[in-house]
Amino acid sequence: MPKVQINGASIHYETLGSSRETIVFAHGLLWSGRIFDGQIAALKNHYRCIAFDFRGQGQTEITRTGYDMETLYSDTIALVESLGVAPCHFVGLSMGGMVGLRMAIRRPELIKSLSLLATPADAETEEKKKRYRLLIMIARLFGLRVVANRVMPIMFGKTFLNDPGRAEQKKQWRENFIANHRIGISRAVMGVSTRASIFDEINRIKTPTLIVMGDEDAAIPIEQAKRINSQITNSKLIILPRAGHTPGVEEPEAVTRLLEDFISKHSLVNKAP
């Protein structure tokens, strides 16, 4: 599998499709680039799609340090530049979207469009920091399987979790979470949960921005998405019914349609030269 050495870490990435335009997918905490499989399956027919794994997650190296948002941002900038895919369309889920916001503020020349799925711009609340620290401690001592039942309702909405027709899919994502390395995940959770707020900076973003939020998201209040929408002039907010914190898995067809429509408006693909 392709890997690139960046900032002292071996970063795993995959490329599907070929086109003069590229979409870079940045996953959310606890997962990997595979969280976008449903979207990439459709979009690879018209775009080059690159999905990568952040430090300590998926198939990327577990490093001793570098899990803070600033280093993850630096890693992502270096990846985009080293692969020569700028300016790209950037799609970020939660943690990945936090990186995307920083890119749009500081390096806007690298992205043509920004799609944010279940993404906050604020710092984590003290209450949630305490809860996540407890989960990390339990996970490091006893393994991820012990905390899986507490993590699933944070990551997925009630419609998905309570649908008997999707029991096998729910089981598979639970196992995907458990398959993570407990040390890598612990460090990643700490890095994300201790992030600084960048809300006061996002009004500088001029990049066309799509904001997608599930109406069953238990991790991030919808109000945070509305606050982002109010600050980014060239942005559009979609509240997606029956979706939680992982909308691309819970409502894959709807998310794919939203991304296709939005990215095509800011793309040369299928347009006359």
Image (cartoon, rainbow, N blue to C red):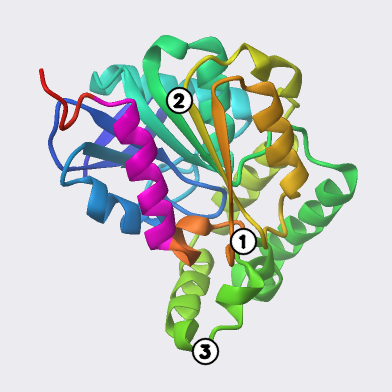
| Residue at figure coordinates x 42%, y 58% from the top left | 254
Residue 253 position by quadrant: bottom left
Q: Of residues 38 and 251, which is closer to you in this image?
A: 251
Residue where numbered disc 3 is placed: 164
Please say whether residue 66 is visible from this viewpoint. no
Callout 2 secondary element: helix
> Disc 2 residue type?
Asp
Residue 6, given in percent of the width and then of the height, sits at 38, 24
> Disc 3 residue type?
Pro
Distance Cα–Cα, label 2 vs label 1? 28 Å
Residue 252's disc is: none
| Residue at figure coordinates x 71%, y 22% from the top left | 198
Classify mark 1: residues with Cα within 10 Å, few (<14), some (14-19) or many (20+): many
> Disc 1 residue type?
Gly
Closer to viewer: mark 2 or mark 3: 3
Residue where numbered disc 2 is placed: 75
> Could you tell which of marks 2 and 1 lies nearer the N-terminus?
2
Q: Is residue 150 left or right of residue 262?
A: right
Callout 1 secondary element: loop
Q: Of residues 49 and 182, which is closer to you in this image?
A: 49
Q: Residue furthest bottom?
A: 164
Segment colored magenta: 252-267
